[in-house]
Amino acid sequence: MSSSQFPASFVEPWKRLIQNRQDGCIDEFPQYNVTDLDSLITTSAPTSLFLGTGYSIYRQALIPAILSAKHSVHLVTCFWAESPTLDAIGEALLSLANTRSQQNNLPPLRITVGFSSWGLFQKLLHTASTDGCVYPPSEWPKLGLPTEATLKRGSIDLTVKTLFFTPFSVMHPKYLIIDNTTAWVPSCNVSWEQWFEGCIELHGDAVQTLLNFHTKVWGRGEVQETRAKDDAIVPLALGFNSQGAIDHEQSQTASLIGDDGISAVQSAILKFGDQVPTILLPSSHHRNPRFKWIPGQPKCNLPPMTPLNAALLTLFANAQHWISIVTPNVTSRAVTDGLLAALGRGVDVEIRTSKNMMLMEQVVTAGTTTSWCLSSFIKQYQSLALERQRAQQSDPESQLAVVGELRVFYYQPLAGKAGDEDEPVFSHFKMTLVDGEYVVLGSGNMDRASWWTSQELGILFYVPGFTENELWERILKNRAEAVFISNNAH
């Protein structure tokens, strides 16, 4: 795959930024240096977009996909907790085992489950080995999964593994790969949190690129299975019943979800073609948080220059018209600095985030909170705008750009639906859209943890004329509390 399919105006400064900061990327897991970057540049066929709570996304997209599997299932998430979502996964595997046990001569179904956080003691006592901790079959029921005997009756081979590195290095990526041909990349965990989430379904070469990443992190030493091309699974958009067959009644119902224009549960069929320029953006974990107050820490204001971090900074630096961000938190100084520079060039910026979400986690991992960071960011913007205004008044022919418009919103539940099962309490969706051309989805937040310590995974699509953001913007605009809208905003 030639990088020429992705604009050189992005690829070249992205690679250069990583190359110039290789010193901060030693002992990364997984390791991606400059010579590996071309392997991340690929194409994909995004086919479906799902929005809603984590449970609704699993119920609507991921569970039917698992039930359709013929050869392999690779499910990776960060948090794994008792919840309706976990119950649904356990029931799906049980149903799959029972269905397969009634059929003869089926090939074994290989299922791997990987997660990072199950409980406090699990993390405190976790091995530091990159091989992780493999749970014996006797522990599976405690994790909400069927017994080994039940799965064996359905010729299902299950492996459950955890990876965690103290003090804060969770494996934050979330994805599902079915039969090595189709992938789903959600923002949600397997947990009880009733948060607003998103998920994209992918086909094409990017699935193999994702599988290569999966092998580096979760499949160390394992032999990867292959499958025949004529065994492609049925597209999820048609719907599935518990046997994996097409369920036209279910399909018709799914297509109507969210048609009232109010529900946070929405879905859309994407028609971008099968050769969308795509870059997989891993961000390796780093055990050292490099807090300035820790004695002996080198002075460094820039985070590790991983493919994901470098891509976001490059997008901010290249933006010409506008940047739209949806993120749970904003505590990364690199983010606010990059956005302030863009505003100084006349680029409009909109941020949608959550108020008082995971406050303790913010303080522990960043030493600050989203509200404090946004307050400081807004003051910096106002000072910049005033400085530009005075400069133009004193010199009408000044070539300084007028600062861009800034809009900042907190998520708030829809008043009439508060308490409903499918009404999110916070927004946990992660999305960056630049100039209506570049779209980043995945696990990475705009907080210090994602930029400095956690392993993350983003996917960048180059889709000129992208308008599908209207789907989530319609949901979020109905659930917005204005924090700041600049005077020059229309």
Image: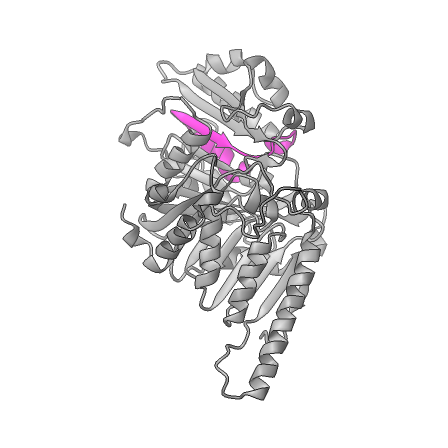
Considering depth in this image, is 26 or 355 the residue closer to the camera? Answer: 26
Q: Is residue 397 visible to the viewer in this orientation of the structure?
A: yes
Q: Position of residue 217 (x, y in %)?
A: 46, 31
Q: Which residues are magenta?
A: 58-85
Magenta-span inclusion, residue 172: no
Q: Position of residue 388 (x, y in %)?
A: 58, 78
Task: Give the left or right position of residue 234, taking residue 136 as reference.
Answer: left
Residue shown at 63% from the left, 52% from the top: 331
Image quarter where the C terminus lies is bottom right
**Depicted 243 relative to depicted 157: above or below:** below
Considering depth in this image, is 116 or 410 the residue closer to the camera? Answer: 116
Task: Give the left or right position of residue 393, taking residue 319 as reference.
Answer: right
Considering depth in this image, is 260 or 31 the residue closer to the camera? Answer: 31
Q: Is residue 204 visible to the viewer in this orientation of the structure?
A: no
Residue shown at 35% from the left, 14% from the top: 105
Residue shown at 49% from the left, 18% from the top: 98
Task: Give the left or right position of residue 139, taking residue 158 as reference.
Answer: right
Q: Position of residue 444 (x, y in %)?
A: 53, 46
Magenta-span inclusion, residue 67: yes
Image quarter where the N terminus lies is top left
